[in-house]
Image (cartoon, rainbow, N blue to C red):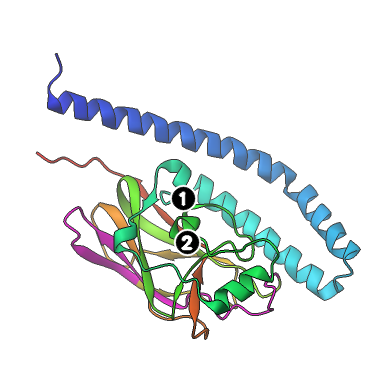
Amino acid sequence: MSGPHGSEQELLGNLEASVKQELQDFKQKVTQVASASGRILQIVRQVLKDRAVQEEQIEEILQLAEVSFKKVLQNYVVMPDWALESMGASIDEERTSKTYGGQGMMTWLLSLFTFSFANPPVAILQPSIIPGDCWPFQGSQGHVVIRLPQYIQPTAFTVWHISKAVSPSGEVVSAPREFTVLGVDEAMAETVLGTFTYDVHKEIAQTFYVQKELPGTFCYIKFQVRSNWGNPEYTCVYRVQVHGMPARHDNA
């Protein structure tokens, strides 16, 4: 009969096997995306032309799309995402800012003809970067606590937001600007891993590396927005990725 430690090791072994299978599946998907990316860009170009989009805008959108493809491939192959719902990540809603559903947000979402309500914070753990498919919170300061699928030693974080080229309003003033990332343990003790700036004038997916040497391992990550790019009513977070190495956590 196996003891409690044997059961714990068995559970950890099963989790690691599951994670490895997920990563293998991701790599297969990445290979498919890489081989099809050229064709996808051609289709996007034709769709934009059919909709009478100006040539300059077409080139800008295609350039951003190509950069996004490369960033996705880099993240999945080199830096797996531990803040992915399909990998087992979730939101600690009790320790997360409330979702904003004010009139300004509702009007903007309804203008997309796709959304009639604001998304919950779990939206940031999903790969969609469709305009409006974000998590909004009130004002320019707020935070979300991500529960990781297992203890991770974080090395970097990637933040996504749509570009002006695809924004229905032509602006991205609701994007996060200055933000701090903290590692959180089971007792909710916080360790600052770095303070960064998301630049809306750069690519839509921006990776930031941990600034603290030997940060340790954490079961939660807190993404704390300190300012946005000018929207006084709300801030929209599209996607947050957590990169790092899985680590065993011994309670003994």
Which residue is identified by label 2? Answer: 158
Q: Is residue 28 left or right of residue 197?
A: right
User: In the rendered structure, are the residues bearing label 1 and label 2 in contact, judged by CB atoms less than 8 Å apart?
Assistant: yes
- The answer to whether residue 86 is above or below residue 70 is above
Image depth: mark 1 or mark 2 in front: 2
Residue at the spot 67% in from the left edge and 45% down from the top edge: 34
Specify start and end residues of the magenta stretch as a single range. Answer: 166-194
Give percent across and percent down for residue 223: 37, 66
C-alpha separation, residue under disc 1 versus residue under disc 2: 10 Å
Vertical relation: 17 (above or below) 247: above
**Quadrant location, the C terminus:** top left
Q: Position of residue 206 (x, y in %)?
A: 52, 66
Dot 1, crowdedness within 10 Å: few (<14), some or many (≥20)? some
Query: Of callouts 1 and 2, which one flags the residue occurring earlier in the amino acid sequence?
Result: 1
When asked about the image quadrant of residue 5, the answer is top left
Judge left or right: residue 204 versus residue 150.
right
